[in-house]
Image (cartoon, helix red, strand yellow):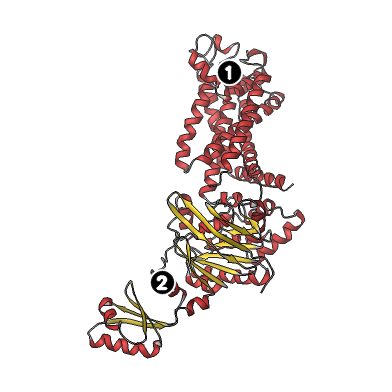
Amino acid sequence: MTLLENAIETSELTKRFNDLVAVDKLSISVEQGEVFGLLGPNGAGKTTTISMLCTLLKPTSGWAKVNGFDIVKQDTQVRKSIGIVFQDPSIDDRLTGRENLYMHANLYGVPTSEQKPRIDRVLKLVELDTRADDLMRTYSGGMRRRLEIARGLIHYPKILFLDEPTIGLDPQTREHIWSYIEDLRKAHEVTMILTTHYMDEADRLSDRIAIMDYGKIVASDTPAKLKDTLEGDVISIKTKEAAKLSSLVAGTVGVLKINTVNDGLDITVRGGKALLPRIVETAAKNGIFIESVSLREPNLADVFLHYTGRAIRAEGGDELHGMAAIRRRQIK
Amino acid sequence: MTEMRGIYTLWLREVKRYLRDRARIVSSFVQPLLWLAIFGKGLSSIATGVQLGNLTYPQYIFPGIVGQTLLFTSMFMGISVIWDREFGFLKEIMVAPVSQFSVFLGKMLGDSTDALIQGTMVFVLGALLASFLGINLNLSVFLESLPIMVLITFGLVGVGLTVASLIESLESFGVIQSFINLPLFFLSGAIIPLSGHLVPGWLQIASRFDPLTYGVDALRTVIDGKAWQPLYPLYFNIAIICIFDVAMITIGTLMFSRRK
C-alpha cells in the first residue's frame, strides 16, 4: 500500500520494574500520518510504553524504532523527531507562555529567525495569543494543556505523542482540545500516538485503536471494526435482581452474552429492538422490578469489556503522587 | 551550537526564575546580616588571640560568611531539581535533544549565577556595615574574590544537584541538606579557626577533607590581605577547588543522566 517506512515499529518491547512486568512483549506498528490510540485502564502500561518510545525509559528487552531510529542507540535523533504532551503538566509556571515556547524552541534547535513566526502561529492555533505574555501560573488547566500541545509542535515533529491529553479537564475544554487535535491533523502531516482511558476520546480521534491491558495488546483495529466484532446491540437493564433476571434470560434465542455490571445487566443480543420487549415481559412475569432500560449500538466500552472481561476504570489520575497530584487537583 | 544554545536556555531560565522571586532576594540579606552583626560583632570581645592571627573577629568571619552563603545557597539550589521533578518540568528537559552534560551544565551555571548573586549581596552588606564591623572592603577586593567565589560555587552547586538527583522527595532533601551543610560549614573554619596547637588533631584532619576549607582560606587570603596567615598557598587552594569542581561536574552529570 505504501512504501513509506512505518512511523513506529516495536518488536517484543518489554519493560520490567523488579517483579512487575509493565509492558509485556509489545509488538505494534504505526503508519505515517495515522492517529493511533492506545486505550486501556490506568496501570495498563500505556505511559510506560510512551516513555520508552520517547527514550525516557530503557526497555528491558525487545526493540523499537521511532521514525526509523533505534530508541536506545539513536536516542538524540528520536528526540529531535518527536513532540510530546505528557500526562502530567510539564511547563514552567514561573515563566510566561511565550517564554516557555521560546525555551522549547531553543532546546530543540529551531533556527532563531524562525522562532518568532512559528511561536506566533502555534499561539494563534491554540487561541492563546492574547494571554501569551502572562505567567503560566495564571492559566487555567485547559489553557495550560493547550499551551503544551502548542509547545509540542514548535519543532515540527513527525510524531506527536499525546499522553492522556484531556485527563482531568471539564467536558467543554475536552471538546475544545479534541477539535484542536483534529485541526492539527488536517494542517500538519503529523502522526499521532494518543493514550487514553476515555472511550469516547479514542473513538473520536483514532484511526486505529489498540486495547492494552496488563502490559499487553488484547485487540487492535479500527474503532468501527472493533465494534463490529461484537456483532450485536447492547440492552442495559437497571435492576436490583440482576442475577435472577440473568438466569431467566440466558436461554433466550438471540441473546449472545450477559455481563453483570454495577447496577444491573448488559445483555448483548442480535436484533435488540425485537428482543427488548420480550425481556421486559419475562421480567414482569417473574415479578422482577426493572428501574430502567436502554438499547444501544455497541461502543468501545463494550469492546473493552468484551476483551478484558471487566469495565474500564473511569477515574483517572489516582496514581499521581506529591506535588504533581496537588497540581492536578488545582487544575481541576 | 545546539548544545551551547541549550545550555544558555537552561541558564536563562534559572536566572529569570530567581530574579522574579523577590522574597528570596530580600531574605538573602537577612541571614548574613544576622551572622555578621550578632556573631561577628557579638563574639568579637571573646574571640581574640593567636588563632586569628592579626585579624579582629569580624575581619576573620566575613570571608567565612561569604563562603557560608555560597555553600547554603548552592545546596539549596538542588531543590530546584526536585521541584522541577515534582512539578513535571524535568521531563520536558530530560526528553529534549540536548546532551545530559549540557542539561547539567546549563542547570549548574544557572544555579551558580543565583548563588553568586547571593554571595555578592554579602559584599554589599559588608560594605554598608564596613565601619560598624571594622572591615576594609573595596571594589578591587571584590573583583579579586569573584573568581574564587565562582570556582567554589561550581563545585558546591554540583554537590547540591547530585544529592537532589539521588533523592526522591522534598522532605528528605531538607534533612540531607543540613546533614551536608553543617559539617561542611563548621569544618571549613568559616567561623572558628581549625588550625594551631589548641585545636584537637582529629578536628584538624577532618577539616582537610572539607573542600570549603580551601575556599574560605583562599577568600581570606584575598580579602584580609597580609593580616591573614594563609593555611595553604593560594595556588594550592585554587588547585584543590578546581579538582573538586571537575569531580563534582563529572559525578553530577553521571547522576543526572541515569536512565532507568
Find residue A314 and report its horizontal and vertical position in percent: 42, 66
The quadrant holding residue B151 is: top right
Residue drawn at (65%, 38%), measured in percent from left and top? B109
Nearest to the observer: residue B149 or residue B165: B165
Mark 1 or 2: in front is 2
Q: Which amino acid does label 1 sit on?
A: Tyr
Among all residues in the image, which is located at the extreme right?
Answer: A113
- In the rendered structure, the answer to whether residue B78 lies left or right of residue A112 reads left
Most distant residue in the left direction: A287
Tell me how far mark 1 sits from mark 2, CA to CA.
Answer: 75 Å
- Residue A12 lies, in percent from the top left, at 53, 59
Seen from the viewer's position, the closer of residues B245 and A259 is A259
Which residue position holds label 2? A305
The image quarter in which residue A83 lies: bottom right
The quarter of the displayed image where residue A146 is located: bottom right
Q: Mark 1 lies on which chain?
A: B
Q: How many marks?
A: 2
Badges 1 and 2, same chain: no
Q: Where is residue A253 in the image (x, y as percent from the top left)?
A: 34, 87
Q: Which residue is painted at 51% across and 30% down in the image?
A: B181
Residue at image mark 1: B60
